[in-house]
Amino acid sequence: MPKVRRTFLLCALVVLLVGAWAPSLGVWAPWLRFDATAKAKVLDGTERAVVAYAAARGLSAVISAVKATTIDIEPGGVGVTLAPAQALEPLNHLLEKFSDLMLVEPPRVLRRLQLLRRWSHEQVEQVFT
């Protein structure tokens, strides 16, 4: 069993070294596309998080403005003030919580981009060469 494990580890090391040196040797390396694809997806995620934050804050502001409206009626000489838009308070609270969550997300996504840049194929290739 240890011989099988040693053979497997040796094969894995050879594959890793060949993979790291392949682009510098002029060999076509399909995994280089993965770095670019991952970076593009991370940047798209950051953009979506910022847009979601802006939309949630804008909708929350609109709901807050609508919520402040009241209707004054006097049926039979008795004054009654109605605020039907107060029913939107739970939705407004939910949007505020969601926007707080979206405010935290872009730095997390940008941290992933930093990690991708640090551990991209070029840096791994430099380690092994």
Image: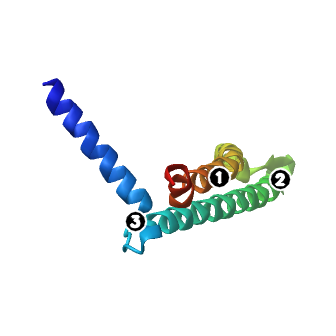
103 to the left or right of 124:
right
Against 7, is 31 above or below? below
Number of numbered tags placed on the structure image = 3
SS of the residue under disc 3:
loop
Against 2, is 14 above or below? below
Q: CA distance from mark 3 to mark 1?
A: 24 Å
Q: Position of residue 83 (x, y in %)?
A: 77, 50
Q: Residue at x 49, y 51 (%)?
A: 128
Q: Position of residue 14 (x, y in %)?
A: 31, 49
The residue nearer to you, when weighing 105 against 75, is 105
Q: Which residue is mark 2?
A: 68
Q: Which tag is nearer the camera, tag 3 or tag 1?
A: 3
**In the picture, residue 70 is in which quadrant?**
bottom right
| Three-letter amino acid code at the position of disc 3 | Ala
The residue nearer to you, when weighing 42 against 106, is 42
Q: CA distance from mark 1 to mark 2?
A: 44 Å
Q: Residue at x 63, y 60 (%)?
A: 46
Q: Mark 3 or mark 2: name the one nearer the start of the chain.
A: 3
